[in-house]
Image: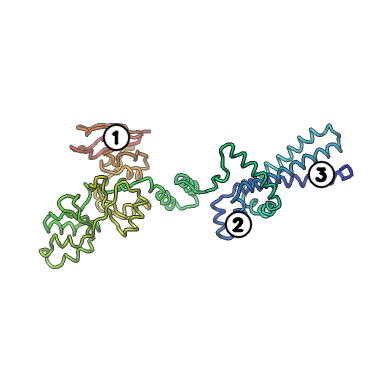
Amino acid sequence: MNSIPIEFLFGILAILIVLSGFFSSSETGMMSLNRYRLKHLVKKQHKGAMRASKLLERPDRLIGVILIGNNLVNNFAAALTTVIAIRLYGEGAIAPASILLTLAVLIFSEVTPKTIAALYPEKIAFPASLILKPLLIILYPAVWLVNSLSNALARLFGVDPSKAANSEHLKPEELRTVVDEHGDLIPDQHQGMLLNVLDLEKATVEDIMIPRNEVIGLDLEDDIPKLLKQIRNSNHTRLPVYEGDINNIIGVLHLRNAARFIHGSDDSVTQEAIRRFTRAPYFVPESTPLHTQLMNFQKEKRRIAIVVDEYGDIQGIITLEDLLEEIVGDFTTNTSEEESEEISPLPNGWHQIEGGTSIRDINRQLHWNMPTDGPKTLNGLMMEHLENIPCGQVSAQIGNYRFETLELSGKMIEKAKVRPVK
């Protein structure tokens, strides 16, 4: 060793520091790769991505080969630094030389390479895989031995490396965060639709159904002139048909079929004719999640369903249009809604709201955060809080919202004004 020129030893030391930087940057670069972008590049047959993906299938082996190489290089660099220090200044220079080597390794082999790799993982990881892949084959016996010992030690702490979470599946809330964080890459309208799709599993049919007291249908116990007037003046394409009470529902009449029995004079129309052209009702439980109901509509080739509770009593109806509007927002004009606004702004931050308005609709329209895990309407929320039907005008605060009744009936709060409390 004493016969080797000192310049040559410095050259080898510099190469070892560069190699140490390579291993450090390749480790950070490989582990910082975006797994979803990596999968996308693999599908496009990107060679660098394919090599990196193959290495990342067994991260324990990848880390093993990188750390073996890094530690070997660093140990050789430390030994070589000791030799150089002794030859130049004697044994007293070993400690200062070790400090200088530590600084050099930190700056040139650790901090700087890892920072660059963290910022540009693909530019570092893909070229590095060209070296790491054959190196893994060459050092496989050492990698296997080290991994076997480390995995055995991990099992002593209750960790099974064979079952390590290598899955990149995201939970709905995590996916929501991804959509929010990358909103600048997605148009606002599309971003809102994606978030609404994720919210479908949080809501049930009961949350968006039209309650039975608002259902417009045909009662076959009515006389023919009244039934024909309803059919001709209806704003809806499909009408439930029942006898006496909506719980005795017969089916659903599509108004395009009305032309089949409305011909000639009105006297020729009978209840039996209406009954004949109705389609059998499609019943769904009120607890059905919206994403499930969307698939059920597609499977059953239906656009309207009758919602029933656990006792089989009809609670309301849900349409495919209502469900789709949960995703894309309002895309049709409802004449009845034009005639009667459920939510109207008032001065000083107040809003006048009808008691039967859905809390989900209130939150969506006003960007509020009223609780939706209990009652589904404003009236239900206030009645639950008051624990009775008020006999006079009352005021209350529920969470961060102030409520004041405006109109009462003997069985519900017809109208109230609400504002958030700052």
Label 2, on which residue?
A: 50
Q: Position of residue 317 (x, y in %)?
A: 26, 51
Q: Nearer the viewer, residue 366 or 261?
A: 261
Image quadrant in which the C terminus is located: top left
Residue visible at 60% across and 54% down in the picture: 54
Label 3, on which residue?
A: 10
How packed mark 2 is, by other alpha carbons closer than 10 Å (few <14, some 14-19, many 20 or more), is: some
Label 1, on which residue?
A: 403
How much space separates mark 3 and mark 2, taking CA atoms? 38 Å
How much space separates mark 3 and mark 1, taking CA atoms? 80 Å
Q: Amino acid at mark 2?
A: Met
How much space separates mark 2 and mark 1, taking CA atoms? 60 Å
Question: Which of the 4 image quadrants contains residue 85?
Answer: top right
How packed mark 3 is, by other alpha carbons closer than 10 Å (few <14, some 14-19, many 20 or more), is: some
Q: Position of residue 307 (x, y in %)?
A: 27, 49
Q: Nearer the viewer, residue 24 or 176?
A: 24
Q: Position of residue 363 (x, y in %)?
A: 35, 42
Q: Nearer the viewer, residue 254 or 169?
A: 169
Earlier sequence position, callout 2 versus callout 1: 2
Residue visible at 73% across and 47% down in the picture: 19
Residue visible at 34% across and 55% down in the picture: 296
Image quadrant in which the N terminus is located: top right
